[in-house]
Amino acid sequence: MLRSRIRRGQGTRADEGTARLPELAINGGTPVRAAPYPAWPAPDDGYVDAVTEVVRSGDWGGFPEPGRNATAFEEAFAEYQGARHGVLMMNGTVTMEVALKALDIGWGDEVIIPALTFSATAYAPMAAGALPVIVDVEPRTWTIDPDLVEAAITPRTRAIMPVHLGHQMADMDRIVEIADAHGLAIVEDCAHAHGQQWRGRGAGCMGAFGSFSHQSSKILTAGEGGSLLTNDEALARRAHSIVDCGRAKDPDEKEFTFGANYRLSELNAALLVIAMQRFPEQQEARAAAGKELERLAAEIPGVRVMPADERITRWSFYNYIVAIDPESFAGRTNEIVCAAMEAEGIPAEVQYPPMSRYELFQPSLSRLPVAVEFAERLDPSKMSFPVAEAAGLRESVYFMETVFRDGSRGVEDAVEALAKIQRNADELPS
Ligand SMILES: Cc1ncc(COP(=O)(O)O)c(C=O)c1O
């Protein structure tokens, strides 16, 4: 669509002599990068051998829970991240639902989440029966704004779910302080933050639970999968029980509790065991490439780099997010700029709209049994998240993780593409 519009605008034979040749690849110009970035996941024989062994063993499923590979991964990942317990399951959405259920959060309870995140963060409280209370993000990091968290607390609030978005972490100093002061649980959404540390403490280890996704695009992946981390043995047991149809995990318990089958197969778990072995080296290379991008991208006019918070002591990100100033891009928004980046051969995406634009997750449109007294507060037309709306609808450009797996060249190409698009912004389709 975009391309055909541009072609139409390129002129006819009569004005061919004066027409300017397009610079941007989205208009037919030469792309900055012709070669694809390294594919992800990056398979090697170690993965093949691990899966072959599971196939030969005949123990393919996740029952009895946890299986041999699941246990090995849970222990290795928990240790790397600095938690006492890991609980492996099907994905990084049900992880958060299970966490809230293990915390006994459900009907009538409120859970505070940020306005800029993947739909899963809002789905989880709803799946547990609780109300997601959405607050705006901070302009400095685009993660949940602690002042707004504090202002949103009511007698029904039970938990805060900060999301460590892109290359940042939420301000865990403030979130922990607020949670402690109000007796609230913290469930960290760490789908983007495998390996991150905040003042020496691992992401996912600072509250009741940390939730991780092992879906294909994530940096610690088995195609599908999700992990919970916790330091609390009783909570770990409850989470194991919920993912295993409610089977008792405590030797003293005889009865089934409330649960479903969220077990992950041993085939996926075996992939994760190998992925974990590869991870520390990948983390170091990605962090070095990320620093280079941070430095170079800051030189592009109209691009605001949001440096990683200095309290992050081990940096291990999924995507790196920059903010464009649409004015410096001839009034075009992030969506057009990302399409132009893709055409230049650079994987870049807008990712998330603000929560006020996710129809399904606007509480008044959902099936939540919302008390009448909340009607005003939950009316989507009255929701306003200025920072998340500016980010999601106009400014955010996510450099995808593959950009950071081709050394300096990968980063330089990405920066050159964005600079080229900015220089030639008047050529962008509107
Ligand atoms: C911030 C965030 N939370 C949760 C999830 C859900 O993870 P999964 O796809 O494994 O269900 C994702 C995955 O895309 C995510 O980006």
Image (cartoon, rainbow, N blue to C red):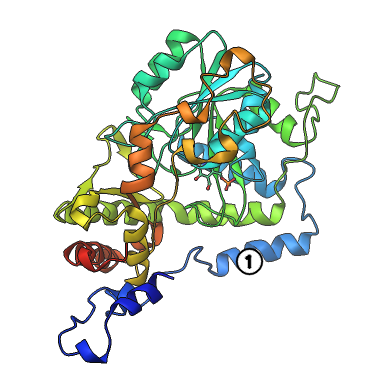
Residue 419 location (% of width, % of height):
19, 63
Check the image and report above or below for 378 versus 36.
above
Give the image quarter of residue 385. top left
In this rendering, does residue 316 appear at all?
A: no
Identify the residue at horizontal 34%, vertical 79% (top origin): 7
Residue 192 location (% of width, % of height):
45, 44
Among all residues in the image, which is located at the extreme front? Answer: 14
- Mark 1, ligand 1, within 8 Å: the answer is no
For residue 242, side relative to residue 110 (left or right): right
Q: Amino acid under label 1?
A: Asp
Tally the numbered discs: 1
Q: Secondary structure at mark 1?
A: helix
In this rendering, does residue 173 appear at all?
A: yes
The one of 37 and 143 positioned closer to us in this rendering: 143
Identify the residue at horizontal 64%, vertical 20% (top origin): 370
Classify the position of ligand 1 by quadrant: top left, top right, bottom left or bottom right.
Answer: top right
For residue 396, side relative to residue 41 (left or right): left
For residue 169, side relative to residue 29 (left or right): right
The one of 392 and 105 positioned closer to us in this rendering: 392
**Are there few (<14), some (14-19), or many (20+) residues within 10 Å of tag 1?**
some
- The residue at which mark 1 appears reads as 49
Residue 65 location (% of width, % of height):
75, 40
Residue 211 location (% of width, % of height):
54, 36
Check the image and report above or below for 48 versus 174.
below
The one of 2 and 174 positioned closer to us in this rendering: 2
Identify the residue at horizontal 81%, vertical 30% (top origin): 247
The N terminus is located in which quarter?
Answer: bottom left
The C terminus is located in which quarter?
Answer: bottom left
Give the image quarter of residue 115. top left
